[in-house]
Image (tube, grey):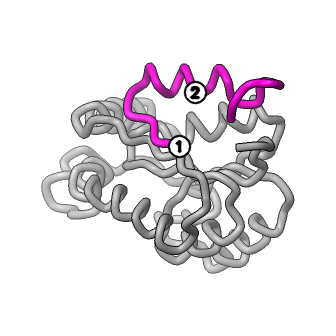
Amino acid sequence: MAETPRRIIVNGVSGSGKTTLAAQLARRLDIPHVEIDGLHHGAGWKQRPEFLDDVRALVRQEAWVTEYQYADARPLLLERADLVVWLDLPRWLSLWQVVRRTLRRRWRREVLWNGNVEQPLWRILVDREHIIRWAWTSWPAVAERIEEVRRTRPGLPVVRLRSRREVRAWLRIVGTPGRPR
């Protein structure tokens, strides 16, 4: 890649580290990170009515990094992206990370977007969309999104990172003058 990307989407299953990587990229490249969950979730975990308008405003900007989530937002993000980063970590690792994160958030009663907190843990037994169940069941769809990217934007670079070691190594060279992108 000849020039540094300025509009980046990070693809991965829940718990893979999308938001963490997006924030690191934003700092490294000195571009804004917009956490797409913050745009999406309103009170009571409902989609905010302004969500797609906010995504449209985001993609009109010259530089941004965000997570590649939400079926209705993905085409808008993909149309303007310069780079896709695919966190293709082992399923067990992503699951471990989402379980650990969910337990921590629930235990601490961390307030997330627009006043939301993680559901009680027993909800994993009855809610098909509980974040831990979602991470497990949606894992195959993440690779399918990349196939869609390749069909829709065949020339768009995709960086596939399969381990934490690869993530760290790639981050070391991103944005470094004279280094490959």
* Count of marks overlaid on the render: 2
Structural crowding at the residue carrying mark 2, measured as other residues with C-alpha within 10 Å and reported as few (<14), some (14–19) or many (≥20): some
At 61% from the left and 59% from the top, the residue drawn is 156
In reply to whether residue 141 is colored magenta, the answer given is no
Answer with left or right where residue 83 lies relative to residue 112: right
Q: Which of 133 and 139 lies nearest the eye of the viewer?
A: 139
Residue under the image location 73 percent in, 74 percent down = 56
Say whether residue 12 is left or right of residue 2: left
Q: Specify the segment rendered in magenta.
A: 159-181
**Extreme residue toward the left, this view:** 125
Q: Determine whether 154 is above or below 159 in the image.
A: below
From the image, tell me which residue sits under label 2.
170
The first of marks 2 and 1 along the sequence is: 1
Residue contact at pointers 2 and 1, CB within 8 angstroms: yes
Q: Find residue 28 and report its horizontal and vertical position in percent.
A: 75, 29
Image coordinates of residue 79 in percent, x first then y, are 66, 72
